[in-house]
């Protein structure tokens, strides 16, 4: 009788071991599928990051080019305006304007000094 009980206990233990092995095989299969999915996701994410890096480099280069173009355009406009003003002041109008400014400064200086300009004009 004891042998029969031992046999039944061993039979039950073997059944439990087989069941655990089956569960472990299923768990391993799930783990491998999860690992495969994770690897695929990692590859996709790496590709996305690489593409974003390329896009950022292209955008940076575009901004650098645009900024350089705007800088050149600003310098050209600035030079053009400076030349226009120089040409204006060098011509007859510029000389007349300089004389008028000089007269205004002299009159303002005389007024500040307290000289009565109307009396000087009547002389």
Image (tube, rainbow, N blue to C red):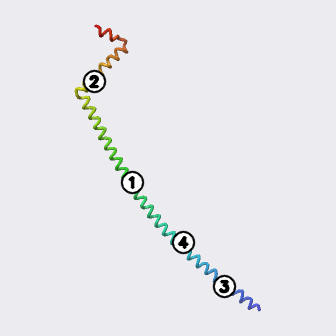
Q: State left or right for residue 34 relative to residue 71.
A: right
**Label 1: few (<14), some (14–19) or many (≥20) C-alpha neighbours in 10 Å:** few
* The disc label shown at residue 34, or none: 4
Cα–Cα gap, marks 1 and 2: 51 Å
Q: State left or right for residue 40 relative to residue 102.
A: right
**Label 2: few (<14), some (14–19) or many (≥20) C-alpha neighbours in 10 Å:** some
Q: Is label 4 in contact with label 2 (beta carbons under 8 Å)? A: no
Q: Is label 1 in contact with label 3 (beta carbons under 8 Å)? A: no
* The disc label shown at residue 59, or none: 1
Task: Give the mark, 2 or 3, whose residue is nearer the N terminus.
Answer: 3
Name the residue: 61% across, 81% down: 22
Name the residue: 22% across, 26% down: 92
In the rendered image, which quarter is residue 49 located in?
A: bottom left
Task: Give the mark, 1 or 3, whose residue is nearer the N terminus.
Answer: 3
* Image location (x, y in percent) of residue 35: 53, 71
* Above or below 28: residue 122: above
Q: Which residue is mark 2?
A: 98
Q: Which residue is mark 3?
A: 15
* Image location (x, y in percent) of residue 101: 30, 22
Q: Secondary structure at mark 3?
A: helix
**Label 3: few (<14), some (14–19) or many (≥20) C-alpha neighbours in 10 Å:** few
Name the residue: 36% across, 13% down: 113
Cα–Cα gap, marks 1 and 3: 65 Å
* Image location (x, y in percent) of residue 51: 42, 61
Task: Give the mark, 3 or 4, whose residue is nearer the N terminus.
Answer: 3
Q: State left or right for residue 4 relative to residue 94.
A: right
Name the quadrant of the C terminus: top left
Task: Give the mark, 1 or 2, whose residue is nearer the N terminus.
Answer: 1
């Amino acid at each position: 009788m004891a042998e029969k009980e031992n046999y039944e206990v061993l039979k039950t233990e073997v059944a439990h071991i087989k069941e655990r092995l089956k569960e472990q095989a299923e768990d391993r299969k799930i783990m491998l599928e999860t690992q495969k999915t994770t690897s695929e996701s990692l590859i996709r994410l790496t590709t996305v990051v690489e593409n974003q890096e390329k896009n950022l480099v292209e955008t940076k280069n575009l901004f650098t080019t645009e900024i350089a173009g705007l800088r050149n355009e600003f310098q050209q406009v600035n030079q053009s305006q400076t030349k226009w003003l120089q040409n204006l002041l060098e011509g007859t109008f510029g000389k007349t304007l300089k004389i008028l400014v000089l007269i205004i400064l002299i009159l303002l200086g005389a007024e500040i000094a307290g000289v009565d300009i109307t009396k000087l004009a009547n002389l």
